[in-house]
Amino acid sequence: MHYPEPLAKLISELEKLPGVGPKTAQRLAFHIMRAPREDAVRLSEAIAEVRDRVGYCERCFNFSDKPICDICSDPRRDQSIICVVEEARDVVAIEKTGEFHGLYHVLQGAISPIDNVGPEEIRLSELVERLGDGTVTEIVVATNPNVEGEATALYLARLIKPLEITITRIASGLPVGGDLEYADEVTLGRALSGRRKL
Amino acid sequence: MHYPEPLAKLISELEKLPGVGPKTAQRLAFHIMRAPREDAVRLSEAIAEVRDRVGYCERCFNFSDKPICDICSDPRRDQSIICVVEEARDVVAIEKTGEFHGLYHVLQGAISPIDNVGPEEIRLSELVERLGDGTVTEIVVATNPNVEGEATALYLARLIKPLEITITRIASGLPVGGDLEYADEVTLGRALSGRRKL
């Protein structure tokens, strides 16, 4: 099918987005053509602006539109505990729980030899630097419970050990609302070994 | 959760797209933040450009970046037959079949009293105008086989009757690869009444 060239270009750009195939890209493009013109202009500007105005917090590497992000500069947050995550979206997920009131450190990835990502490619040395002044007493490692996340957690544990800081790992186990019958063996094994007194 | 303001704005703009909820909008926005900067710039420009450079064909009201679209101005297309569709995306769908070699007319909607769309709100009078010079001998009505599409088809049939032009409707029936057991009664009834000699 022959689209007008700017429309074909828009469809091919939209297809680069995650989870957007040719059909969805076409639907989105046709929506953009039919929606009020201001909506298209605002979307276009928002995309351009986000890259110009949002960068990374110099301390925790979360997304921020200031040199130091709102969480790092909030005096009410517990400065003695840092939660280490792989991606900025993980900060969003943890903030939503309302269970954590410390600071974050976003590694920007996880150790993955298969993808050529070693400890130097992620923000590990910057984390160690943050531990220098003795304020931090606990590191919660909240990397994903998969091969790369576990490898990163182990590496981190070894790295931090000499500093005599408590290092903890988020629990693995059955998801709330889950069903033993459908749990895989590894998860169920973790749930058993991580059992707690009632 | 508190996002940097430009990121929050992008997420809220993305949420306006069809089929994009808060989770998807966040995922897309985070992807745009992490993808190469040129990708974000190109996407932003493509959205802005599509509205500036693509409009509607003056003859058939399909999307076009020229006053008359490529299909209307292609001398190899059969000028005596017009396929009437509701939306530009329907043109794409029909072109993909490779079964139709005539021209199109995009109504830009269907008659729907419930949505306050009457015959004047869609491009019906423009279609009748195109029939004036006697070149067109058949109209294929390919509006959707739902209430609005059928109402539009019936209205169109009455409108065109005095002009002595053949008016046909695309067939309703079982989809290819479908199963009688799962077909609804209306579709199965249509498939029976529309049966053809083998």
Image (cartoon, coloured by chain):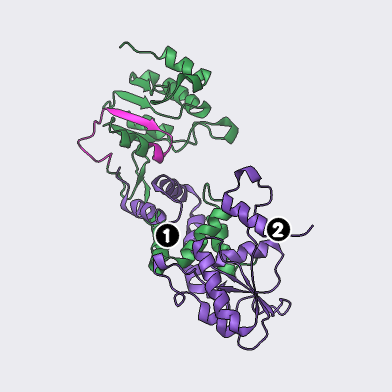
Chain colours: A green, B purple
Q: Please name whichever residue, A110 or A158, is drawn nearer the observer in this view of the structure.
A: A110
Task: Describe the element under mark 1 as helix, strand or loop.
Answer: helix
Number of other residues with Cα within 10 Å of mark 2, as a class: few under 14, some 14 to 19, many 20 or more = few
- Is A156 on the left-hand or right-hand side of B85? left
Residue B25 % position (x, y): 42, 49
Question: Start and end of the magenta stretch?
Answer: A71-90
**Looking at this rendering, what residue extends furthest in the bottom direction?**
B133
The secondary structure that dominates the magenta segment is loop
Q: Residue at x 24, y 30 (%)?
A: A78
What's the residue type where badge 1 is placed?
Answer: Ala
- Disc 1/disc 2 C-alpha distance (Å): 55 Å
Dot 2 falls on which chain? B
Rendered image quadrant of residue B193: bottom right
Quadrant housing the N terminus of chain A: bottom right
Q: Residue at x 51, y 19 (%)?
A: A186
Number of other residues with Cα within 10 Å of mark 1, as a class: few under 14, some 14 to 19, many 20 or more = many
Q: Is residue A111 magenta?
A: no
Q: Is residue A85 magenta?
A: yes
In the rendered view, tell whether residue A18 sits above or below residue B108. above
Q: Please name whichever residue, A174 or A118, is drawn nearer the observer in this view of the structure.
A: A174
**Looking at this rendering, what residue extends furthest in the left direction?**
A76
Q: Is residue A183 visible?
A: no
Task: Describe the element under mark 2 as helix, strand or loop.
Answer: loop
Residue A24 % position (x, y): 54, 54
Q: Which residue is mark 1?
A: A48
Dot 1 falls on which chain? A
Residue B180 % position (x, y): 65, 45
Q: Please name whichever residue, B193 or B31, is drawn nearer the observer in this view of the structure.
A: B193
Q: Which residue is mark 2?
A: B195
Residue A174 % position (x, y): 43, 22
Res. B169 mark: none
Q: How many marks?
A: 2
